[in-house]
Image: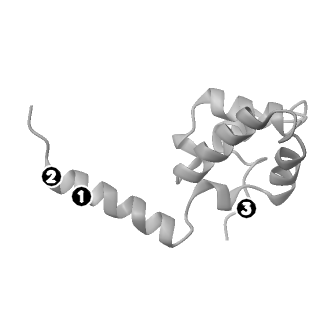
Amino acid sequence: MRFDSSLVTNKTQQQLDNIINNNMLINQIKPEILVKLDKNYEKYNLCVNNIYDKLSTKCIYGQLDVSDVRDIITFAGLDTSDWQPVDFLFGSKILNKQQ
């Protein structure tokens, strides 16, 4: 099995660029959600750490698994009763609005 070294290099460079430019998903999460996660950190530190790890390594909402979104909702104590399907699909209730 051969690896395309240019693909690996380009992907690694893109990840580095995203980190340097603060383009990670954690920077797009609404501040009030991060505050709620912080409040639950002491009680659920492993789960909240896992959420922060995912948000710090992903660049776009679509890279999250359904279980990641579920964990954000659960450990931030979000009420989803007024959410529409598009809010789950595109993270419109979780992410800051794009400029």
Considering the numbered disc 2 on the image, is that residue within a helix, a strand or a loop? helix
Q: Are marks 1 and 2 in contact (CB under 8 Å)?
A: yes
Indicate left or right for 58 with 39 as reference. Answer: left
Say what secondary structure mark 3 lies in.
Answer: loop
Q: Which mark is residue 5?
A: 2
Q: Residue at x 78, y 57 (%)?
A: 30
Q: Give the CA distance from mark 1 to mark 2.
A: 6 Å
| Element at label 1 | helix
In the rendered structure, the answer to whether residue 10 lies left or right of residue 59 reads left
Give residue 39's position: percent from left, percent from top: 90, 46
**Does residue 36 lie above or below 28 as drawn?**
above
> Vertically, is 33 above or below 83?
below
Front-most of 64 and 52? 52
Determine which residue is flagged by label 3: 97
Residue drawn at x 87%, y 40% as measured from the top left = 40
CA distance separating discs 1 and 3: 32 Å
Mark 3: amino acid: Lys
Residue 94: x %, y % from top left: 76, 48
Q: Earlier in the sequence, mark 2 or mark 3?
A: 2
Which residue has dot 1 on it?
Answer: 9
Residue density around tag 3, few if under 14, some if 14–19, many if 20 or more, within 10 Å: few
Q: Amino acid at mark 1?
A: Thr
Label whose residue precedes the other's in the sequence (1 or 3): 1
